[in-house]
Image: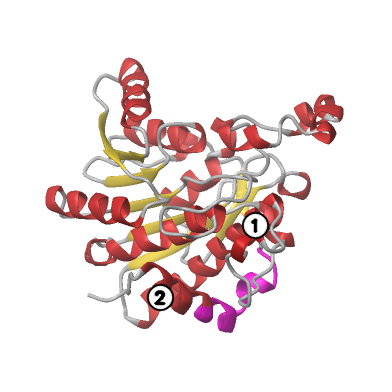
Amino acid sequence: MRQEKWTTAYIPELTGKTIIITGGNSGLGFESAKAFANKGAEVIIACRSLGRGEEAKKQILVQNPKAVIEVMELDLEDLNSIKRFASRFKESYDRLDILMNNAGIMTVPYGLTKDGFERQFGTNHLGHFALTGLLIEIISKTPESRVVNVSSIAHKNGDVDFDNLLYENGRDYTPMKSYRRSKLANLLFTYELQRFFESRGIDSMAVAAHPGVSKTNLVRHIETKFIIRLFRPLLVLIIQSAAIGALAQMRAAVDPDVKGGEYWGAHGYREMSGYPVLVQSNEISRNTETAGKLWEISEKLTGVVYQF
């Protein structure tokens, strides 16, 4: 029976499980890391700043001295960093029960990653696509493993323009348009990855989730905008804490009733807040032809081919 008011109290015992959380040092990722560690999992906080990662680890250990937390450097804007992370992980671990692709950037000015990709699409989609591909063998060898991709309600207004996927030289770029596209790509990737698992008889699943409208570091680039300041009193009534917002991705990661290819989000008005429930993504995200083409392009751009 699926609980309609699902909280961390429903997280099962996770002793013996290994979990990677990208961006696990803050916001949704931190809340997920803390909750999973409290249930006995070994949690790898994968983040750009080792200092911030160690601080997050320290905070968790203060609350739970028995928590098993490892901090590893990962910069999703740098393919070489992603490759180094994957290599180090596989040298130290022989299983990966949950890969939570949580990290991301939101509505930043136009810029490029170290490999020349538009930053939001490069970080939010291509970085996680490459990371997952480099870890796909160990994921596939771990029974009942899961890949959880964190999307957003913003995907509903997103598009995929294969003629200008990366906003070359900033053409047609707006911070929100790019963010929406990257979050739509997260869903297209999730569903195609689930088909990848199913077609090969792999005992793994791909699931997506979104946090509704939650108070995290992602919103720092829009907090100063006039319209945001004008409606701040109303937004306070809508925006939920990171602890509540993270419930959807936690449920997607550990609820035994979750199925591959599902999408979990907030149950409230327009999915902006509330407890995690099964939700639906937009029509574009379900287009298998678009998903297949995006996968092919992502392999070419990153040089990461899903094979083992």
**The magenta segment:** 281-293
SS for callout 1: helix
Q: For marks 2 and 1, give the CA distance.
A: 20 Å
**Residue marked by disc 1:** 178
Residue type at tag 1: Ser
Image check: 126 left or right of 187? left
**Residue marked by disc 2:** 300
Within 10 Å of the Cα at label 2, are there few (<14), some (14-19), or many (20+) other Cα atoms?
A: few
**Can see residue 121?**
yes
Nearer to me, 200 or 22: 22
Q: Earlier in the sequence, mark 2 or mark 1?
A: 1
Residue type at tag 2: Lys
SS for callout 2: helix
Nearer to me, 286 or 132: 132
Within 10 Å of the Cα at label 1, are there few (<14), some (14-19), or many (20+) other Cα atoms?
A: many
Residue at position x 39%, y 77% in the image = 196
Q: Quadrant of residue 213?
A: top right
Residue 281 in picture, x, y percent from top left: 66, 64
